[in-house]
């Protein structure tokens, strides 16, 4: 899910400023407005940057190794499935951060649809790991 960044500029910096003031002063609601306060806003869409991905990957590997002997839920391919609570613990991030990450385009395909009967969202540890690694590769290529 892309986010929006607000961009603001002073209308007085625009070439069309005089025309804009003339048009606005014709309207009743702008009869006594302060022209110095006139601003123009625009919204730019951008994709959220995930911070601390290297550490989260390290934490996930460590958590999976530490919990390898426990009973766990798997999907049809035998991949370990984690609920949001366990995934946040495994990555070493807070739940709100995890929710933001899961809404981003980077982790959208990690939800496992094979377990829907208990109304708990499960995420494949393998899919999360590969998506975060892919994110790191793409981000290092951009820089």
Image: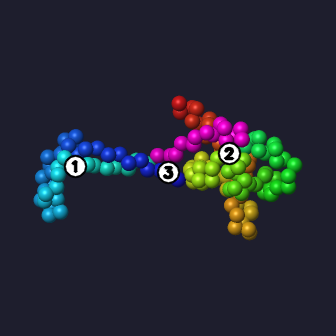
The span from disc 3 to disc 1 (Cα, nearest Å) is: 30 Å
Closest to the observer: 96 or 114? 96
Q: Is residue 87 above or below residue 28?
A: above
Q: Could you tell which of marks 2 and 1 lies nearer the N-terminus?
A: 1
> What scheme was used to colour the molecule?
rainbow
Residue carrying label 3: 2
Tell me where residue 68 appears, x and y as whole percent: 84, 47
Closest to the observer: 59 or 27? 59
Closest to the observer: 113 or 132? 132
Tell me where residue 90 appears, x and y as whole percent: 72, 47
Residue carrying label 2: 92
Q: Residue at x 82, y 44 (%)?
A: 66
Residue carrying label 1: 37
Q: Residue at x 22, y 50 (%)?
A: 38
- The segment highlighted magenta reads 46-59
Asked which quadrant contains residue 60, the reply is: top right
């Amino acid at each position: 899910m892309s986010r929006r960044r607000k961009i603001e500029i002073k209308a007085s910096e625009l070439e069309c400023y005089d025309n804009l003031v003339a048009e606005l002063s014709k309207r009743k609601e702008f009869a006594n407005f302060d022209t110095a306060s006139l601003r123009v806003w625009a919204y730019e869409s951008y994709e959220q940057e995930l911070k601390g991905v290297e550490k989260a990957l390290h934490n996930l590997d460590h958590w999976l190794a530490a919990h390898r002997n426990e009973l766990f839920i798997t999907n049809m391919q035998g991949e370990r499935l984690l609920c949001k609570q366990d995934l946040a613990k495994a990555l070493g991030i807070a739940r709100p951060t995890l929710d933001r990450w899961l809404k981003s385009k980077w982790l959208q395909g990690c939800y496992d649809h094979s377990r829907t009967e208990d109304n708990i969202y499960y995420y494949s540890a393998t899919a999360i790991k590969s998506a975060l690694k892919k994110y790191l590769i793409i981000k290092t290529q951009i820089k």
